[in-house]
Amino acid sequence: MRRRLSERRRQSYLGDAVLGGIDGCVTTFAVVAGAVGGGLSGLVVIILGFANLFADGFSMAVSNYQGTKSQREQVEVARRSEERQIEEIPTGEREEIRQIFASKGFEGETLENIVEVITNDRRLWVDTMLTEELGLEVEGPNPLRAALATFVAFIVVGFIPLAPFIISGLSKETSFLASSIGAAFAFFGVGTTKGLVLGRSAFRAGLETLVTGGGAALLAYVV
């Protein structure tokens, strides 16, 4: 039980990887489709594709890093505020703990014991106020790991629509067809992986991601 509960506290970066993978595939395929539709050469397709792959991937990773870092900073600001309030008005903050757990159905001696246990531990007291009163996540994801998961997934999955144009001997039309098929498999693969990790139906999750990601890619192609 200790092992299982400990595993539940570990941060998952699956969402960051899924977002990066889908966006990498969509944006790279959009560049490929636009270049092919504009009648540009295969070499230009490769140059534009790689430029987008690394520049957009890095940009998305930086954005994710800044967003995740901002969330952690928000928690720290709230923590300092709660610590100051506990220092200045402990009676009021203790009453807030009482009201929080009273709203969960605790009462009488049990309620008072809960209040006593929580308010005797300053760290636990502050963490409880952050999670129960403010709805914040005390242990958020690591910004650097979140950014890295986004960047790696963006590069790996985003490379798939570009790969056929690197193969010599293929016509531009054949390369584009292979790119479209590769993008479809990439979307389905990302969704399947997500389903397996989350314990959901792998096929259903794959189909869901294929439809949503494919729709985004189709929109980019049409535009």
Image (tube, helix red, strand yellow):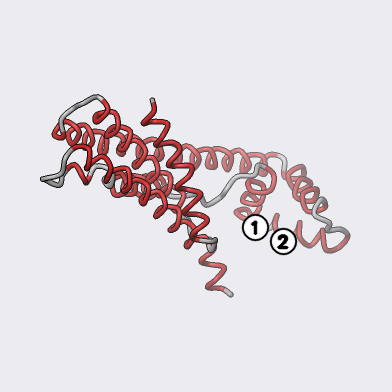
| SS class, disc 2 | helix
Left or right of 119: which side holds 2? left
The percent position of residue 109, horizontal first and vertical second, equals 86, 63
| SS class, disc 1 | loop
Q: How far apart are marks 1 and 2 (CA)?
A: 7 Å
Residue at point 46%, 56% (across, down) = 194
The percent position of residue 116, horizontal first and vertical second, equals 75, 59
Seen from the viewer's position, the closer of residues 182 and 57 is: 182
Residue type for callout 2: Val
Seen from the viewer's position, the closer of residues 91 and 30 is: 30
Confirm or deny contact between disc 1 and disc 2 (CB under 8 A): yes
Seen from the viewer's position, the closer of residues 79 and 48 is: 48
Q: Residue 113 carries which label?
A: none
Q: Quadrant of the N terminus?
A: bottom right
Q: Please tell me how crowded label 2 is: few (under 14), some (14-19), or many (20+) other residues with Cα within 10 Å.
A: few
Residue at point 67%, 39% (across, down) = 85
Residue at point 77%, 49% (across, down) = 100
Q: Which mark is residue 121?
A: 1
The percent position of residue 123, horizontal first and vertical second, equals 60, 54
For mark 2, what is the residue? 117
Residue type for callout 1: Asp
